[in-house]
Amino acid sequence: DAGITQSPRHKVTETGTPVTLRCHQTENHRYMYWYRQDPGHGLRLIHYSYGVKDTDKGEVSDGYSVSRSKTEDFLLTLESATSSQTSVYFCAISESGGLGQYFGPGTRLTVL
Amino acid sequence: AQSVTQLGSHVSVSEGALVLLRCNYSSSVPPYLFWYVQYPNQGLQLLLKYTSAATLVKGINGFEAEFKKSETSFHLTKPSAHMSDAAEYFCAVTKGYAGGTSYGKLTFGQGTILTVHP
């Protein structure tokens, strides 16, 4: 299995609080991605990174920001959590960008 | 723009029967296509991928898929279902290299839940 960890694995928070999720890889892959998974929607891309300090928006980026200061870490921040951001968040990595991604175990976030 | 449609949100088969999960894609450039499997409370695992080499692709756990350009399809099959195949399956598409830089961004289908009956 690809060396990808996500922390925390579960989190419950209140509306309006900031939340940061961490993705850590030991594969030295260039590309990293954050997705959210919701019933009936499959997985939707939030943000992605194609190198240190190089990030861009995905299809559902509103209310989220990211940072990548090191190859191995990709942080997802919910600036002010809302109940609509209750979801399961997955991080993924890819070496070449086009040949498939490898996913972390996910973080289940509940916003009350 | 690219999109993926998985026909059937739920598929039920008997153990030992053929598994067929359908995926159709739309892409303005040559695509790369993927199937992923997700077991309960786990992340996604790559089953197989098509990247413009052989059109019949073999993956893990006895699954295979055939890329048919004329039908814009990439259906997933397994000759004989096993109880351990019960999971959710996702088809995904990205631009192939001939289509220019996409940073590997995947567009996923809605998923198909496979149930296997004894």
Image: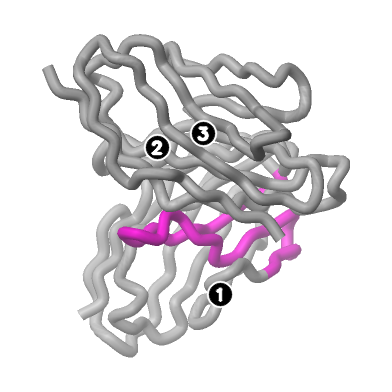
Quarter of the image for residue B8 reads: top left
Disc ID at residue B35: 3
Q: Is residue B117 above or below residue A38?
A: above
- Gap between marks 2 and 3, in whole Å? 7 Å
Which of the marked residues, 2 or 3, is nearer the chain's N terminus? 3
Q: Are marks 2 and 3 in contact (CB under 8 Å)?
A: yes
Q: Amino acid at mark 3?
A: Trp
Q: Is residue B25 above or below residue A108?
A: above
State which quarter of the image contains the N terminus of chain B: bottom right
The answer to whether residue A32 is magenta is yes
> Which residue sits at x=75%, y=47%?
B95
Q: State the residue in front, B70 or A48.
A: B70
Q: Amino acid at mark 2?
A: Tyr
Q: Is residue A14 left or right of residue B20?
A: left
The spot of residue A87 in percent (x, y) is 33, 65
For marks 1 and 2, give the one nearer the viewer.
2
What chain does badge 3 belong to? B
Q: Which residue is mark 2?
A: B89
